[in-house]
Image (cartoon, coloured by chain):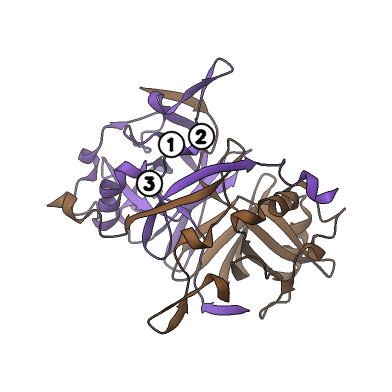
Chain colours: A brown, B purple
Amino acid sequence: MKIKLGRIPYVYPIPMALAGALVEGKPNFELVGDTGLMGVNPPLVYVSSSREHYTNRGIVEHQAFSLNFPHSGMMAIADYCGIVSGREVDKGILFEVFYGELLGAPMIAECPVNLECKVVHEFSIQHRQVFVGEVLQAYASEDYTELRDGKRALPDLTRLDPLLYALDNRYYTIGKPIGFGYQEGKPVGK
Amino acid sequence: MKIKLGRIPYVYPIPMALAGALVEGKPNFELVGDTGLMGVNPPLVYVSSSREHYTNRGIVEHQAFSLNFPHSGMMAIADYCGIVSGREVDKGILFEVFYGELLGAPMIAECPVNLECKVVHEFSIQHRQVFVGEVLQAYASEDYTELRDGKRALPDLTRLDPLLYALDNRYYTIGKPIGFGYQEGKPVGK
């Protein structure tokens, strides 16, 4: 039997990211759960943020942003970046900041993975402003990569140890690998 | 030190959902990782799917879709729904299907949580078609709810046991709760 829970967008889990932007000449980072994948080729991601947020101003001005994925050990500082606004607190000084090609996409060295994004589409629904970004470059901390076929690649998620969230307002860790895409379903159709 | 990984949209983990649509009068379900949260109020989610996918035809026609979140025990059947197209296989018969208000949003009874969505915005970037949906109703299987303050509510994610994915092509389980939003960061600013 199904129970109605109301008009609530229960996507779960929500991958948490620190969205980076350059606002009034300074790097600013906002903790967001309103982010995700929109396609691999072209490589598209997005961030959705209320119009009044300080971050939005920087994204609009520079047409760029970054996504920085904290590990679970960064939970307290990431949560802090979701509590305080860049209007009151200089969040750029909390991290070691680095840049790729885009001045408008400051990135956080402490985060295992960073995506440098150029805005390719933008729309609004009520107070939400949604910025769709094309990934110009993905970066990983060397400590969070492994050699595979002679090239540096991302390890599995248990090593990346991402910070997850759900609408029960709890943070979660990742569990364990249980199978492979486009493989597990093969016996089903037989 | 940071390593460049190329133009790859490494969002992780990716919450897996079976996107439901009514195509040529029949329910069809496509496994998608290109989905996520765009805001709580209004309750916005999206699905991004290549224009040639069979599912897209139904979403365009009915301006509706559903998101159905499988538990990890459904990995094989969910993966199967990502391997085969509704053009060749009637995927509606794989599940017990139910409906809310929208004829165009068939939902899967076996999935712990279902979102019934009306399309409120649509755009394309190259071959990707992105459908933004407003959640008209969220449903949960009674077995996957708990009483809280006299009302049925979702339990924590360890009970919902969602199926996660990453671009290393592995499926993952959820880990454990480690903290609360808007709480863990409070000591940081002190």
CA–CA distance in space, label 1 to label 3: 18 Å
Q: Residue furthest bottom?
A: A150
Kind of residue sitting beneath label 3: Ala
Q: Which residue is mark 2?
A: B156
- Residue B157: percent from left, percent from top: 48, 38
| Label 1 close to label 2 by CB (< 8 Å) | yes
Q: Secondary structure at mark 3?
A: strand
Q: Which residue is mark 3?
A: B19
Q: Nearer the viewer, mark 1 or mark 3?
A: 1
Q: Residue furthest left?
A: A190
- Count of marks overlaid on the render: 3
Question: In the shown orientation, is residue B116 left or right of residue A132?
Answer: left
Q: Residues within 10 Å of mark 1 (few under 14, many from 20)?
A: many
Mark 3 vs mark 2: in front? 2
Task: Say whether marks 1 and 3 touch (CB < 8 Å).
Answer: no
Q: Is residue B69 visible?
A: yes
Is A60 above or below relative to B7? above
In the image, B43 versus B127, the foreground residue is B43
Tell me, yes or no, whether dots 3 and 2 are on the same chain.
Answer: yes
Residue at 38 percent across and 46 percent down: it is: B19
* Mark 1 or mark 3: whose residue is earlier in sequence: 3
The image shows residue B93, relative to residue A69, as above or below, that is above
Which of the 4 image quarters holds residue B186? top right
Find disc 1 in the rendering and name its residue. Answer: B160
Three-letter amino acid code of the residue under disc 2:
Asp
Q: Percent x, y for residue B102?
A: 40, 33
Are labels 1 and 3 on one chain? Answer: yes
Residue under the point 74% across and 53% down? A81
Residue in view at x 43 percent, y 36 percent: B160
> Are the numbered discs 1 and 2 placed on the same chain, yes or no?
yes
Residue at image point 42% right, 28% down: B144
